Image (spheres, rainbow, N blue to C red):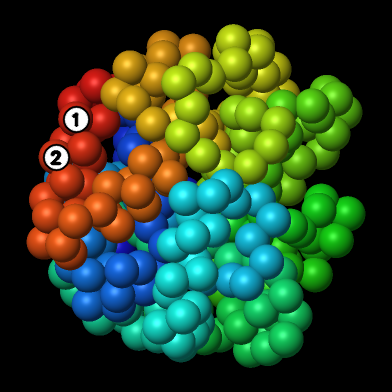
């Protein structure tokens, strides 16, 4: 795996838009998650966002919340998730971005947590409930260890806050396309085009758009509006949970190929 920053630079050099699928680790089970990482890597994923199951996922909609609840019911812990990443290091090229809430980080201690994820091979980190004002204690030690901590910009953010977040965010900038939680939506707000343009005006860092994207046509729209990456979560989680694990894996493989083809 390369770093998140290096992956984006390589994609930019070849004028490509990145595809970033999201999975909830441990749903339907850990073995299926391990297989899914390899399948997505082979099916066109440029980076992969792996969600650590959490009991109070404030940013997540019903599909991902349900997946996290199922995984927690199976006893899935952070250590289990990191073991999957560690095992996958030699098999996949897509950098793994860990998606976790701040409480598990605080509970373990920042230094201890970062050491754990670095040893496992995690390359990036997204913490949706970490505000800019409290991010420095995680940003600096993460950067020192080669972990890109990506910050989120809300669609309601004023330009001054966009500038401040863009300055601090590492790897790329995560633009939330909707006000609210993750989920499958039939349309993406047209204001996203304006927001992408505003971010590009204040920084040359890549912009990834997520929350609500569930169709190849929407992914293409994000690329045409100037996004450097398309992040798709609930649509992958839903497909993987339907039918048998084998059916779910086949479904996400086909979906991943369709999404990647749309933004080539």
Task: Name the residue: 41% across, 40% down.
Answer: 232
- In the image, is residue 148 above or below residue 159? below
The alpha-carbon separation of the residues under discs 1 and 2 comes to: 6 Å
Report if residue 9 is visible in the image.
Answer: no
Task: Name the residue: 33% across, 17% down.
Answer: 217
The answer to which image quadrant residue 48 occupies is bottom left
For the N terminus, the quadrant is bottom left
Q: Residue 171 vs residue 249: left or right?
A: right
Percent coordinates x, y for residue 173 in the rendering: 60, 39
Q: Is 204 in front, or is 52?
A: 52
Q: Is 164 in front, or is 260?
A: 260
For the C terminus, the quadrant is top left
The answer to which image quadrant residue 104 occupies is bottom right
Percent coordinates x, y for residue 253 in the rendering: 16, 46
Q: Is 23 in front, or is 112?
A: 23
Pointer 1 residue: 258
Q: Residue 228 vs residue 114: left or right?
A: left
Pointer 2 residue: 254
Q: Circle 2 sits in a helix, a strand or a loop, which is it?
A: helix
Percent coordinates x, y for residue 259 in the rendering: 26, 30
Q: Circle 1 sits in a helix, a strand or a loop, which is it?
A: helix
Q: Which class describes the residues within 10 Å of circle 1: few (<14), some (14-19), or many (20+)?
A: some
């Amino acid at each position: 795996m390369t770093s998140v920053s290096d992956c984006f630079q390589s994609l930019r050099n070849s004028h490509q838009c990145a595809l970033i699928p999201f999975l909830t680790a441990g749903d339907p089970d850990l073995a299926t998650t391990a297989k899914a990482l390899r399948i997505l890597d082979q099916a066109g994923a440029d980076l992969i966002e792996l969600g650590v199951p959490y009991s109070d996922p404030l940013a997540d909609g019903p599909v991902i919340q349900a997946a996290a609840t199922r995984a927690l019911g199976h006893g899935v812990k952070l250590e289990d998730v990191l073991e999957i990443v560690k095992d996958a290091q030699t098999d996949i090229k897509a950098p793994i971005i860990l998606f976790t809430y701040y409480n598990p980080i605080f509970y373990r201690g920042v230094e201890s947590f970062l050491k754990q994820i670095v040893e496992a091979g995690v390359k990036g980190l997204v913490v949706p409930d970490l505000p800019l004002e409290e991010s420095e204690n995680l940003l600096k030690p993460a950067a020192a260890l080669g972990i890109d901590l990506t910050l989120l910009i809300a669609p309601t953010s004023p330009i001054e806050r966009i500038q401040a977040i863009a300055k601090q965010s590492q790897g790329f900038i995560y633009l939330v396309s909707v006000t609210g939680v993750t989920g499958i939506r039939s349309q993406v707000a047209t204001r996203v085009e304006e927001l992408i343009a505003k971010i590009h005006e204040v920084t040359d860092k890549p912009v990834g758009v997520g929350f609500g994207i569930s169709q190849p046509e929407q992914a293409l729209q994000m690329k045409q509006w100037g996004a450097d990456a398309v992040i798709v979560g609930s649509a992958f989680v839903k497909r993987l949970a339907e039918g048998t694990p084998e059916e779910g894996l086949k479904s996400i493989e086909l979906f991943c190929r369709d999404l990647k083809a749309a933004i080539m």
